Amino acid sequence: MTDFSAPVADATANWVDTHAPLWARPYLRLARMDRPIGAWLLLMPCLWSAALAAGVARDLSHLPVTLVLFAIGALVMRGAGCTWNDITDRDLDGRVERTRSRPIPAGQVTVEQAVAFLGLQLLIGLVVLLQFNWFAVATGVASLIIVAVYPFMKRVTYWPQAVLGLAFSWGALMGFAAILARIDAAALWLYAGSIAWVIGYDTIYAHQDTDDDALIGVKSTALLFGENTQCWLALFYGLAVVLVALALWQGGAGLAGYLGLAAFAAHLGSQVVRLRITDSPLCLRLFRSNRDAGLVLFAGLLVDAIVRASV
């Protein structure tokens, strides 16, 4: 008999394992509700973009509702993306120590049940998306192409983190689409900067699995960069800061926005200095700390939007 209470190896002692009903636990694990860091990281570019767009518009009237909808959408669509990833990677996950206890390879959920759950999450995401203008709806739907192909990239290229960057950074376009019904140059610079950021932090995350990945033939930037990861991380994080700075300049941001960017840059720099690729627990902590890095940048952009709207 399947044990629905058995936790996932890398997500123990969380609210899903201790408080959720037994029948719901496999589905909550599929959606990664037991580790919300991915939803936070998906949300960050949405927050940045919405705040910067509100600053460009000098109007905060649409910002609160937009932020709430983005938060719900990020939570649901991150869950949908993870469910799709687990469906496509079910055979690979069963061969990796960290992932073999996930719901599908552990037998807690069938593929058919996972597909049905995926459909439910996509439906909820569609309902959220339809609350925006039609330009934003079309922009959001376009992201599904990248989300659909991402799980297969690790089989064909050492740069799956770049494809993840394309998907996880889409919110940098959505804020402008939702608030201004257009995509400005500032949004494109912000999108590019977020992609560089995602490549950096997901390379850190991938260093947890390099031994297993090498054995089963899965590719990643962690394997590609190897002992040179710190240099590459400095490059991508530095590029992220420069590109976001260009977005702020193009969007007419003020002092508060640049102070937020400076704090963001300092946080990323500390990750580069502290990184030890052979220390898996440290890699996980540094990866998770990117939520805080994203929040300090958002705080600066939010204050800047408030200042600009009050002038």
Image (cartoon, helix red, strand yellow):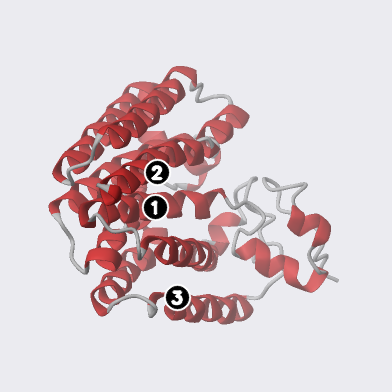
Three-letter amino acid code at disc 3? Val
Above or below, 90 relative to 258: below
Measured from the top left, where is residue 301 in percent x and y?
34, 43
Mark on residue 298?
Answer: 2
Closer to the camera in the image, 22 or 85: 22
Three-letter amino acid code at disc 2? Phe
Which of labels 2 and 3 is toward the front?
2
Measured from the top left, where is residue 178 in percent x and y?
30, 67
Mark closer to the chain start, 2 or 3: 3
Q: CA distance from mark 2 to mark 3?
A: 22 Å
Horizontal side of 178 relative to 251 (left or right) equals: right
Above or below, 203 relative to 282: below
Three-letter amino acid code at disc 1? Leu
Which residue carries the number 1 mark?
A: 47
Horizontal side of 206 relative to 18 (left or right) equals: left
Instruction: Assign a secondary structure to mark 3.
Output: helix
Measured from the top left, where is residue 124 in percent x and y?
51, 78
Which residue carries the number 3 mark?
A: 128
